[in-house]
């Protein structure tokens, strides 16, 4: 069952579609045939700008985790055989410091509904009882509602499709690699391998984001590219204001 068949979600989808169409019309004199893609990029930038306070909270939480790393390692050594005690003592330490180990998840959770709406609005052929005009919009000749996997399966993947998706996917992967190299996590575990493990997991996460871009509509892939690039830039800037302690 399509969740957007429920009236509240259907109304939200219709509002999103109308807003993107209005923004597309506004940007057409500047962006021409790529106005809808520019609208998606602009919406992404507005969402990320609205999440700057959450990004600041994330930077502060990262700084706190780095500062608490020696004490966390000591707790892990002391209670490694008692998972329940380990969790209790870890949470007690965070409470004493007025911090939360989950603060870094806020930006991701906050923008999840926006990603879902952009994904959905480019999947539905009809919205609000009328044809979805956004599905006629394209970037460099590639429909914004088209995914690379679907185009390959349908045999419609031409050179433009491969080029546009290739640029987007490679750019996401490149930003992910830069993020892994420039923003290595602080050591928290009981040995020096922890930063390498965490850095490896971060690389896998960004590789997964690039892989997801192959399966979602081009509009959603553009959202992913802009948001990972924004995230990297924002975190580099915030590192100057909330530097991590020297190891």
Image: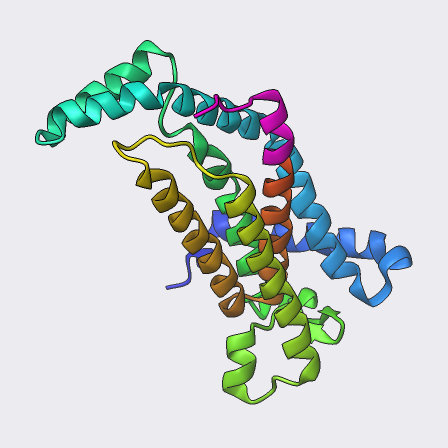
What's the colour scheme? rainbow
Q: What residue is rendered at 26% in x and 21% in y?
A: 91
- Front residue (pair 20, 225): 225
Give the magenta range.
Answer: 235-247
> Residue 126, position in %: x, y?
59, 68
- Asked if residue 9 can be seen in this view, the reply is yes
Up/down of 125 relative to 183, above or below: below
The residue that appears at 63% across and 78% down in the rendered structure is 162
Q: Position of residue 166 (x, y in %)?
A: 62, 71
> Relative to 220, is 198 above or below?
above
Residue 93: which quarter of the image?
Answer: top left
From where the camera sits, is residue 128 visible? no
Question: Is 72 left, or right, of 6 in this rendering?
Answer: left
Residue drawn where x is 55% and y is 67% of the image? 124
Side (left or right) of 191 relative to 53: left
Q: Is residue 30 left or right of residue 16?
A: right
Which quarter shows the C terminus? Answer: top left
Q: Is residue 194 magenta?
A: no
Horizontal and vertical percent position of residue 239? 58, 28
């Amino acid at each position: 069952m399509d969740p957007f068949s429920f009236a509240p979600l259907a109304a939200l989808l219709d509002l999103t579609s109308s807003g993107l169409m209005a923004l597309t019309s506004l940007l057409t004199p500047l962006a021409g045939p790529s106005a809808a893609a520019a609208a998606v990029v602009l919406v992404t930038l507005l969402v990320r700008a609205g999440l700057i306070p959450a990004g600041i909270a994330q930077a502060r939480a990262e700084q706190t985790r780095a500062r608490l790393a020696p004490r966390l390692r000591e707790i892990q050594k002391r209670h490694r055989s008692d998972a329940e005690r380990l969790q209790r003592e870890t949470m007690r330490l965070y409470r004493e410091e007025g911090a939360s180990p989950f603060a870094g998840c806020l930006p991701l959770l906050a923008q999840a509904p926006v990603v879902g709406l952009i994904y959905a609005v480019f999947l539905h052929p009809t919205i609000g009882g009328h044809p979805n005009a956004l599905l006629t919009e394209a970037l460099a000749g590639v429909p914004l509602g088209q995914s690379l996997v679907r185009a390959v399966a349908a045999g419609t993947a031409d050179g433009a499709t491969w080029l546009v998706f290739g640029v987007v996917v490679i750019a996401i992967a490149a930003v992910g690699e830069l993020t892994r190299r420039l923003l290595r996590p602080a050591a928290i575990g009981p040995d020096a391998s922890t930063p390498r493990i965490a850095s490896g997991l971060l690389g896998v996460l960004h590789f997964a984001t690039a892989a997801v871009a192959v399966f979602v509509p081009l509009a959603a892939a553009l959202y992913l590219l802009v948001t990972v690039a924004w995230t990297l830039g924002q975190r580099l800037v915030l590192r100057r204001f909330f530097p991590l302690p020297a190891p």
